[in-house]
Image (spheres, rainbow, N blue to C red):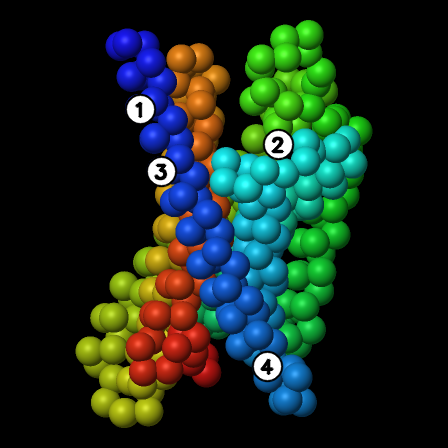
Amino acid sequence: SMLSQNKSVKTTEEVALQILLLCQVGVGTVVNIFLFVHNLSPFLNGSQQRPIKVILANLAVGNTLILLFAFPNNIRVFIPREFPTDLKCKLGYFIWLVARSTNMCSTCSLSTYQLVTLAPGTWGRVMLRGRAPKFVRYTCYSCWLFSVLNNAHIPMKVSGPQKTHNDTNTKNKWVCSTTGFSIGMRILSFAHDAVFISIIIWSSVSMVILLNRHHQRLQHIQSTNQKLRVHAETRAAHTILMLVVTFVTCYLLDCICTVCNISFVDSRVWLRRVKEILSVSFPTFSPLLLIFRDPKDPCSLLFCC
């Protein structure tokens, strides 16, 4: 009876985590679509789109793809569906990894661009003068192209659920097989993430130093217009710093959960659900942060700076 009670508790925990995951996916998808439309609206109206809005639009697309392609793998608890085919596994895994890589690249571009615009008299700011929109667009295109090329090998390493002789083990019928990944590929994947995370942390620390200088400079400024401009730049940088901290925190927790999932075999089912929630946490919370950062004018978080 004790064994059956433990099984029922595990099932309840799993369903609770599944409901949380579905809520994240539902809310996150709607909010990201809103964020994308808002940042694309200047372009549709014929006015010049701010460089920062181009990056945010790309971030919203990446977020939406991560959420949508996390969805089919997790709705099965509530709605009976067909077992995933070989093609679905290959395509779903590829798109999810491309979106994840693009998200990391877009976040890196966002923090680096804000650092360049904050730092007065830098060579980067001089280079971007008048050419920022075109440069940022090319950067966003490069992020997508790099992500596609970097994950081009994924479809060859992923296959449909492995058939087993044990018919009672139905859970394996729902899980795509990723046994083709070698240690070398995992090291390359870690190196890819480490490079982007290092740039994000470097740009964030540099921004904190610059913001401290801005705060000291603000005390000696007499002009109201200059004070407003510096305040706008500071608020924009604060928003991006909050976004970056959220990204890095979610990523590190996801990595810790992955290590625990590999180390502790007994807790794998529970940890797998937690890992799935962590993997869609940033795509869910980042657009909410961007939208509600300025309650007077939702989504206009970065002002005109």
Q: Which residue is mark 1?
A: 9
Residue at position x 25%, y 78% in the image = 218
Do residues under tags 1 and 2 come within 8 Å of each other at their CB atoms? no
Please rate how many residues cluster around mark 3, counting C-alpha atoms within 10 Å: few if below 14, some from 14 to 19, many from 20. few
- Nearest to N terminus: mark 2 or mark 3: 3
Quadrant where the N terminus sits is: top left
Residue 241, how many percent across, how many down? 37, 58
C-alpha gap between disc 1 and disc 2: 36 Å
Please rate how many residues cluster around mark 2, counting C-alpha atoms within 10 Å: few if below 14, some from 14 to 19, many from 20. some
Residue 156, how many percent across, how many down? 79, 29
Q: Residue furthest bottom?
A: 224
The amino acid type of the residue labelled 3 equals Ala
Q: Nearer the viewer, mark 2 or mark 3?
A: 3
Please rate how many residues cluster around mark 4, counting C-alpha atoms within 10 Å: few if below 14, some from 14 to 19, many from 20. few
The amino acid type of the residue labelled 4 equals Ser
C-alpha gap between disc 3 and disc 1: 11 Å
Residue at position x 44%, y 12% in the image = 265
The amino acid type of the residue labelled 2 equals Ser
Q: Which residue is mark 2?
A: 189
Q: Which residue is mark 4?
A: 41
- Nearest to N terminus: mark 1 or mark 4: 1
Q: Does residue 75 sit above or below 51 in this rendering?
A: above
Q: Nearer the viewer, mark 3 or mark 4?
A: 3
The answer to whether residue 247 of the structure is visible from this angle is: no
- The number of numbered badges drawn on the structure is 4
C-alpha gap between disc 4 and disc 2: 35 Å
Residue 27 in which image quadrant: bottom left
C-alpha gap between disc 3 and disc 4: 38 Å
Q: Nearer the viewer, mark 1 or mark 2?
A: 1
Q: Residue furthest front?
A: 1
Q: Which residue is mark 3?
A: 16
- Nearest to N terminus: mark 3 or mark 1: 1
